[in-house]
Image (cartoon, helix red, strand yellow):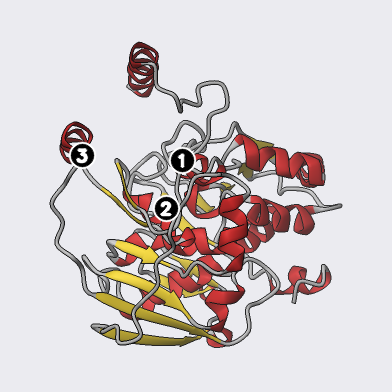
Amino acid sequence: LHAEENKRTRDGAHRLGAKYFHEACPGLHHQLMVDNGYARPGELILGNDSHTVLYGAINAASTGIGEADLAYATVFGELWFRVPTTVKVVLKGKLPKFPFAKDIAMHLAATFGDDFAQYRAIEFTGPVADELTLDGRMCLSAQSVEMGAKFGLFKADQKTLDYVKARTDRAFQPVAPDPDAEYERTIEVDVNSIPIMVSKPHRFKNGVPVKEVAGTRLDQACIGSCANGRFEDIAIASRILKGKKVHPRVRFLVAPGSYQVMLQCLEAGVLNDLVRAGAQVLQPGCGICLTHAGYLLGGEVGITTATRNHKGRMGSTDASVYLGGPATVAASAITGEITDPTEVLREIGAI
């Protein structure tokens, strides 16, 4: 089915003379959008995938729509929307030295539910939002749809402007809340009170401290997806696995989000330690989410940085999928069971 869809897409792109078509260098389409400067601050962007919300990380109002709506918007250049109310999420505290956005997302869903922002915009703000790298912001924006959000927005600060200007010379106009902006709700979170999290099967909102599920036997561990397939996610795994070995029972799959991300990893040398440790580096793309790779059989258990963990998400409906941040997944790949990464993070100086 996917092969047929890909062929129709390629044939259509060639027939229509599509200017922006990345046939030779595939990857997650969300990552390609930001890698190539196709998404810019202040824009309204629609995409045929729920995780289109990712571009909120660079100050774009982006959201997923269905195929019928996409066809209508493509033909007529317009689409009906209800303007959502906004939930302000204020992230306070000091950001850890290792990628922590995934843990923040799981904590929000576990604490406030996976629908607290249903058809609402989330505005991420506060000192930790400012500290987050663009990689971390993309994770949090992408996962905002797992809280029901229509949009998941960050302000366009200097990091954003530098990132976008390095990728496009097209003009853009960032947006910001008015001084008298009204919010339906304000949620304040002290990031330093959030433990390292894992979401248990089969809902994103089933987040618990990793200690509660530590020791759960694993068959597979995966790092990738539009939530956590970027450089900082793969780099922390490389640091954790340097000089160690993947547990002989575990399939450890690493999927860079795009060829540009893969090149970043190659140039920094982070793939060397992963491969030597026994990790399988996959072609950039959606493989670990769409079961092109990383298929779990009935009764198998996996931990992944992917976006979702509902039944059948990674293969058999009788498999169990846990979600974790990249450090948790990497540490678990070594031990063969879900593992609190605190000790190994301390060993490498990340905490």
Secondary structure under tag 1 reads loop
Residue farthest along the front direction in this orientation: 171
What amino acid type is highlighted by mark number 2?
Answer: Ser
- Image check: 170 left or right of 184? right
Label disc, if present, on residue 320 of the rendered structure: 2
What amino acid type is highlighted by mark number 1?
Answer: Leu
What's the CA distance linking mark 2 and mark 1? 8 Å
What's the CA distance linking mark 3 and mark 2? 42 Å
Instruction: Read off the residue under disc 3.
Output: 77
Find residue 99 and report its horizontal and vertical position in percent: 63, 66
Quadrant including the N terminus: top left
Secondary structure under tag 2 reads strand
Find residue 17 and report its horizontal and vertical position in percent: 39, 16
User: Would residue 203 be visible to someone looking at this image?
Assistant: no
Which of the pair 27/179 is nearer the observer? 179
* In the depicted structure, whether residue 208 falls above or below residue 223: below
Please tell me which residue is depicted at 46% across the width and 31% down the height of the picture.
292
Dot 2, crowdedness within 10 Å: few (<14), some or many (≥20)? many
What's the CA distance linking mark 1 and mark 3? 41 Å
Return the disc, 2 or 1, that comes first in the chain's sequence.
1
Tag 2–tag 1 contact (CB < 8 Å):
yes
Label disc, if present, on residue 296 of the rendered structure: 1
Which of the pair 323/174 is nearer the observer? 174
Residue farthest along the right direction in this orientation: 243
